[in-house]
Amino acid sequence: MYFRCPVCFYNQMPYPPEDYHICPCCGTEFGNDDVECGYDNLRINWIAAGAPWFYGDPPRNWNAWAQLADANFGVVKQGVAKANIMEIGYSPLHYSLA
């Protein structure tokens, strides 16, 4: 069983984010770093530092920005309209990233 870090959204933590466990991705020590600083602020600080991998070698093909996007952090999604066969001049909406 794996756990998800509430700071960087890394979803392969071997232990829950509590009891002084440390996220190998962002380096947050839960029960210490998050006592005076919330997850949002910790995340902002990690991103501002370039979102580096914290401990050891990162997993193969790991990408911090893709990890954040997978968690819908910083991604704007626009819906795609369903086609109405009776509608004249139908044009689907497009997706865009923030």
Image: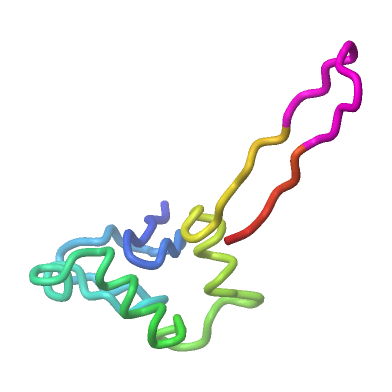
User: What is the tally of numbered marks visible in this picture?
Assistant: 0
Q: Is residue 91 above or below residue 2?
A: above
* Residue 34 horizontal/vertical position (percent): 16, 69
Magenta: main secondary structure: loop
- Give the residue at x 73% y 29%: 81
Camera-nearest residue between 29 and 74: 74
Horizontal and vertical percent for residue 45?
Answer: 31, 79
- Residue 76 or 4: which is nearer the viewer? 76
**At which x and y percent is residue 22?**
27, 74
- Give yes or no for residue 3 being in the magenta stretch: no
Q: Nearer the viewer, residue 29 or 7?
A: 7
* Residue that extends furthest to the top in the rendered view of this protein: 86
Magenta region, residue range: 81-92
Image quadrant assignment for residue 15: bottom left
**Residue at the (37%, 63%) spot, across then down:** 14
Corner quadrant of residue 63: bottom right
- Residue in the picture at 45% in, 59% down: 11
51 left or right of 70? Answer: left
- Position in image of residue 29 (x %, y %): 22, 75
Q: Quadrant of the C terminus?
A: bottom right
